[in-house]
Image: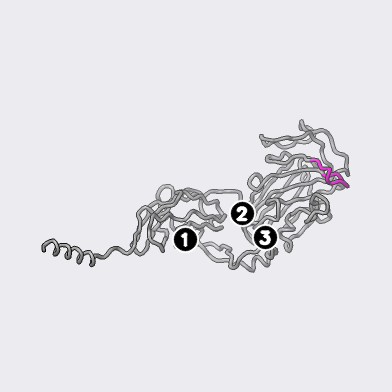
Amino acid sequence: MRKILFILLVTSLSACTKYGDGFISPYVQYAVNQFTVVRGRTASSYSLITDGSNIPMHVKWVHIYDSVGNIVDSLFTKQYPVSIWTAAYNNVTDVTYSSILAKQSVVNLPPIRVNESNGTIEANSGTLYLPLGTYTMDLSVSNSAGAEVLKKIMTIVIADGKPLETAPEQGAFSNSLAHVGNAAAAVTLFNGQNNPYDLVTVTRYADTPNTIILKIMDRNGVPFNPRTGELTKRPNTGLNPTPPFLQNLQDYAPDTYQVNDSAISIKFPLVPFPIASLGNGFNMYYNILSAYVHIDSTASWSSNPSGGYYTGVSDSHYKGVYQDGGYNYYLRIPMRVQVPGAYEIAIKLLNTTHR
């Protein structure tokens, strides 16, 4: 009888026991605990690993500390104007400056935010204004079971990168010659990293507007004139190719493309730009017509690991000058803008002289 009464008592007590509403783990974490942000670029971290915690969860950052432990929340709460998409981008129909801008708006945002539902750390172009350095972050995670503060859960490194990438990030410069009247009979001068013929200077000279100025010059700094046709589109190879010309800045910005006596310029609506490749990566292809250029004849550069530049007549590769009028000069330029701003790309072709 006593045994029966004991079983009934236990059963009665367990029927009245209330269990907690879900579970929240003190071991919520990221797969990696360092997130590097290149200033001015968009980037996202991994989301949190919840370690079995009930969802939905609510995540927010509590404090951010600099490398010596000072709380620097104000650096990361200050807001900056950032362009955001308001509709889906279509790479077939959204080819003009105006059509892309129509799908964007400018809002004020902090440079780094934490996604409240999954903990993903999201960086935007406002990071351009953050000081370089290493920071650590405290997060608060909560759900129906309670809350946990995760101390120093993530290290954020704010680093500098190239705001406009050329070689090696987006490919390699290439210089070649095409026989006038027989483009298929081409001579490759150099194709690869550390191109000895192309002295490239990229200058970001203003935060706004978003523009690119491209200037292509001979060894003495004399520009080839795109207005008068000295600098033109580069023909595609093969019989009746489609498209007949390889892509360049005009194809990526058809409605803002302009030329003057010394340079090409475009306006671009957003970064990264170009948004999507028209083929062959993010390369721009140009042709200098034979009537406007003297070209040095040189021994083949099979590679240039030391990154040396061609020095003309005094260079060991110099072999004389090609016959004038025999070749068009083909140029491939890799480029992609990662940070908003105004840029000038100046390229000296060290084996040419304007004529």
In magenta stretch: residue 180: yes
Identified by mark 2, the residue type is Gln
Q: Which residues are magenta?
A: 178-187
Residue 303 position within the rendered picture, expressed as x and y whole percent measured from the top left:
70, 35
Q: Earlier in the sequence, mark 3 or mark 1?
A: 1
Q: Mark 2 to mark 3: distance in Å?
A: 12 Å
At 70% across and 56% down in the image, what residue appears? 278
Question: Left or right: where does residue 5 sit relative to residue 282?
Answer: left
Look at the image and tell me in which quarter the C terminus lies: top right
Residue for badge 1 = 115
State the mark number for residue 338.
2
Name the front one of labels 2 and 1. Answer: 1
Classify 335 as above or below 196: below
Residue 188: which quarter of the image? top right
Residue 40 position within the rendered picture, expressed as x and y whole percent measured from the top left:
57, 55
Near-viewer residue (350 or 238):
238
